[in-house]
Image (tube, grey):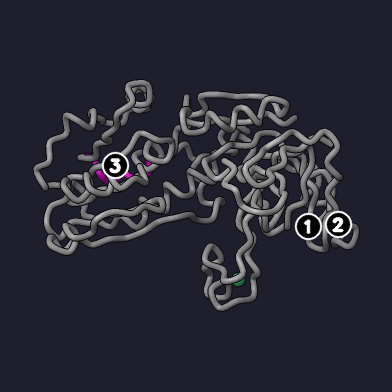
């Protein structure tokens, strides 16, 4: 079968990748759409693995030892895949915090093959049935939607406060959508006119970053750029004792945060079933967020375009 394989700093389309062999408790799925993210960019890590972390697909088969009822429940179902495989046994898993499992393995990394392949084996615990009226194009965005909803959940400021979402990435636009129901004074600050036009079409209040001013009057800033400059800007925008939510790894000078007693919270990821439910309810509008769609044969060069596009999706089958 065909698969996109990462080896160190190289990605290539392997036309003869071995078929997946599901272990006990696993299913073989046929990916339909796979969303590319910065995590798919090769980073020089040792090993060889199939890339691809964000996937909507169809369950093709289950391990032969699976109970018949489970097989009947899943076979042929449309699913979204959670990229984090939790152990289910550690203290964090038992406490309901599987996203912080101490033995967590992530698919599409050297730890475990991902979804940029014609077939892949995934633990049943990672599969979430896609509601009938949620499209494949919506379901493939379940991972970033779940992350955005989690960022909105940790925001914790009173309704009506001045709120800024910093950045014009897919994540920033999803965070703005997740927050705006409770935060009517929300604005998104970005730099790319094309991306701001997408925000405009989705009804998100926005301004170019250079026009924002720095009055230190924001009660909440959700920092979605993941850059030291973004962190510095966020700390210039926040009022004393304001709240800063970080959504991606970053570095920078935290001295202003100490001076102003900024309350810092972090949000990384969340279970995707909540995202699928929100998409089914229409709470999050994903119209226009997929800006490029390619076939599996063109996935390798498309991965290089990930930083330039709102969202690149690979149509696998
Ligand atoms: Zn665990």
Instruction: Provide the residue designation for mark 3.
Output: 165
Name the mark nearer the viewer: 2 or 3.
3
Q: Residue 6 in magenta?
A: no
- Secondary structure at numbered mark 3: strand
Alpha-carbon neighbours of circle 1 within 10 Å: few (<14), some, or many (≥20)?
Answer: many
Q: Which residue is mark 1?
A: 26
Residue placed farthest to the left in the image? 215
Disc 1 + disc 2, Cβ < 8 Å: yes
Q: Is residue 188 left or right of residue 9?
A: left
- Label 2 CB less than 8 angstroms from ligand 1: no
Is the C-beta of the residue carrying label 1 under 8 Å from the nearest atom of ligand 1?
no
Q: Is residue 279 above or below residue 197?
A: below
- Spatial separation of the CA atoms under disc 2 and disc 3: 44 Å
Residue 169 location, quadrant: top left
For the magenta stretch, what is the residue range?
Answer: 177-184
- Residue 312 in percent (x, y) is at 55, 30
Instruction: Give the quadrant of the C terminus.
Output: top right
Q: Quadrant of residue 16?
A: top right
Mark sitting earlier along the chain (1/2): 1
The x and y percentages for residue 290 are: 52, 28
Q: Which residue is depicted at the point 68% across and 59% down?
A: 125
**Magenta-drawn stretch contains 178:** yes
Q: Which residue is under mark 2? A: 63
* Secondary structure state at the residue bearing disc 2: loop
State the CA–CA distance, disc 1 to disc 2.
Answer: 6 Å
Does the image show residue 130? no
Furthest-bottom residue in view?
91
Instruction: Please name the residue shown 74% across and 43% down the image.
Output: 77
Q: Is residue 155 visible?
A: yes
The answer to whether residue 116 is left or right of residue 82 is: right
Q: Which mark is residue 307?
A: none
Upstream in sequence: badge 2 or badge 3: 2
């Amino acid at each position: 079968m065909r698969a996109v394989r990462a080896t160190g700093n190289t990605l290539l389309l392997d036309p003869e990748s071995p078929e997946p062999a599901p272990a006990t408790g696993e299913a073989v799925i046929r990916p339909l759409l796979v969303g590319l993210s910065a995590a798919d960019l090769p980073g020089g890590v040792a090993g060889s693995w199939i890339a691809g972390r964000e996937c909507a697909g169809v369950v093709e088969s289950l391990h032969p030892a699976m109970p018949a009822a489970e097989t009947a429940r899943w076979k042929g179902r449309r699913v979204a895949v959670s990229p984090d495989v939790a152990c289910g046994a550690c203290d964090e898993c038992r406490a309901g915090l599987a996203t912080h499992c101490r033995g967590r393995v992530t698919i599409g990394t050297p730890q475990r093959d991902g979804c940029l392949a014609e077939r892949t084996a995934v633990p049943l615990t990672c599969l979430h049935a896609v509601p009938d009226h949620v499209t494949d194009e919506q379901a493939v965005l379940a991972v970033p939607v779940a992350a955005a909803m989690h960022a909105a959940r940790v925001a914790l400021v009173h309704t009506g406060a001045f709120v800024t979402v910093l950045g014009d990435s897919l994540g920033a636009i999803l965070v703005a959508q997740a927050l705006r129901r409770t935060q009517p004074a929300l604005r998104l600050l970005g730099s790319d006119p094309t991306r701001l036009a997408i925000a405009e079409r989705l009804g998100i209040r926005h301004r170019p970053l250079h026009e924002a001013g720095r009055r230190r009057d924001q009660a909440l800033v959700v920092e979605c750029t993941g850059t030291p400059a973004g962190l510095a800007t966020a700390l210039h925008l926040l009022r004393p004792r304001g709240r800063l939510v970080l959504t991606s790894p970053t570095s920078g000078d935290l001295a202003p945060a100490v001076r102003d007693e900024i309350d810092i919270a972090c949000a990384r990821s969340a279970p995707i079933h909540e995202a699928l439910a929100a998409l089914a309810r229409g709470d999050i509008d994903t119209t226009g967020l997929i800006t490029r769609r390619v076939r599996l044969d063109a996935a390798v060069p498309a991965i290089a375009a990930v930083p330039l596009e709102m969202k690149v999706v690979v149509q696998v089958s």
